Image (cartoon, rainbow, N blue to C red):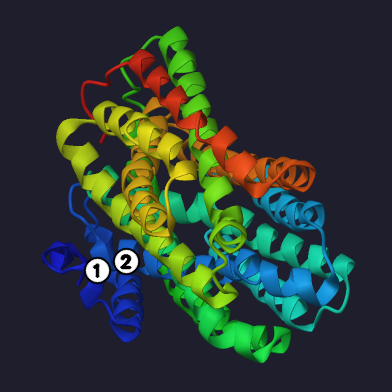
Amino acid sequence: MFLHSDQQTAEELSLSELTKSIAAAGTPASASFSPTVLVLPVVGAVSFVHLLNDIIQAILPAVYPMLKLDYALSFTQIGLITLIFQLTASLLQPAVGLYTDKHPKPLLLPLGMVFTLLGLVLLSLGQSFVMLLLASALIGLGSSTFHPEASRVARMASGGRYGFAQGLFQVGGNAGSALGPLLAALIIIPRGQGSIGWFCLLAIVGIMVLLRVSRWVVSSNARLQLRGAAKNGNGLTVQQTRQALLVLALLVFSKYVYMTCLSNFYTFYLIENFAVSVADSQLFLFLFLAAVAVGTVAGGPIGDRIGRKPVIWVSIVGAAPLALLLPYVNLAGAAVLTVLIGLIMSSAFSAIIVFAQELMPAKIGMISGVFYGMMFGISGIAAALLGMLADATSISTIFKLCAWFPLLGMLAFWLPRIPRPQT
């Protein structure tokens, strides 16, 4: 049963255990749901599907070198593919979250994966730049419906350990982002675009698991508990709340401009500056994204223990000197620095999400949608602009320019201290 599952670890949850545990929520025992007890199988389930979802999403940038060669794409066109994906993944998220705050729609979870599946099919079959754009739009639409509701479910099942739950949920996505390029290098690059179709199996598994999660959401009283906690407020004035949200938005901006530079153009940087092969560049990207996953899962529990503000402060500003040094080191140095940057910077995001949720406890879905949407939107716009700048100058130039953005992390000084998480 759920109520004693906090003694397990996420790694122990096989797909069958996840579905069996979540299916048990449909029994009358689910009525004994407690907001102070971690429901780990549910958090593990949405984290697992986040992994599957982001493996699929990570395939898109991972195959950019192959698509660039096959379709004679420019860096500007590469940036536009990312822009379309990121915009569709961002614009709808706040609206979806706001709507489901008032009108819960648990079935949006599996529906989002259906859109992702359709985009993946089109990506494997597409024969033109326009079809690639449409495929990226469908995959982005899947994200915009999945993330706000899945983040809310993670908070419902957190038992008050909000940082841990959001960190575990987010690390599923980061692990998927790390595995995507590796799987692309092993499966897609050697066999060509058509082999992308094999990844449809991941989307189908995700749909099956999310149908079970939706059943748990409907049968439990978790939403009622979450609404009850929202009545307590955040203990801050309206002006303090608005100022804090603005600071968090600027921190997300600084973080994701730089992370977009690395995640989208790191392979090209290595190929251009160190003459590594496409397959080897994917392995270096995997190391960076794996470090991002580790940092994400560590940042949540640390934020629960010492507070969100110190984690946000250290994670963003701490990466600044490493980012400034990166364009001037050799291949081995670049590998080490990007791993350290990934570890440090990634610890901030779960803390930022939980901080924002505590600022707006009555609008968990909307605020999650805003910040996940902001993450995708900033990444998309940055990718397009950086692609155009790389065409006009060089890949090295954009790495030197973006290295200054982590210094905006000093704005964390103006974040208020929330006395305690709202439960």
Q: Is residue 292 above or below residue 11?
A: above
Q: Position of residue 298 (x, y in %)?
A: 24, 50
Circle 1 sits on which residue? 10
Judge the density around disc 2: few (<14), some (14-19), many (≥20) Cα neighbours within 10 Å.
many
Look at label 1 and name its amino acid. Ala
**Foreground residue, 198 or 387?**
387
Relative placement, left or right, of 78 versus 365 is: right
Q: Position of residue 115 (x, y in %)?
A: 68, 68
Judge the density around disc 1: few (<14), some (14-19), many (≥20) Cα neighbours within 10 Å.
some
Q: Earlier in the sequence, mark 2 or mark 1?
A: 1
Badge 1 element = helix
Look at label 2 and name its amino acid. Gly
Q: Position of residue 131 (x, y in %)?
A: 85, 70
Relative placement, left or right, of 398 versus 390 is: left
Q: Position of residue 127 (x, y in %)?
A: 86, 79
Circle 2 sits on which residue? 44
Query: Mark 2–mark 1 contact, CB under 8 Å?
Result: yes
Count of numbered tags: 2
> Which residue is pictured at 73% across the width and 48% down the height?
387
**Foreground residue, 360 or 347?**
347
**Foreground residue, 160 or 296?**
296
Q: Is residue 408 above or below residue 115?
A: above
- Indicate the quadrant where residue 230 lies: top left
Query: What is the C-alpha distance between the residues marked 2 and 1?
Result: 6 Å
> Which residue is pictured at 50% across the width and 35% down the height?
403
> Which residue is pictured at 59% across the width and 73% down the height?
278
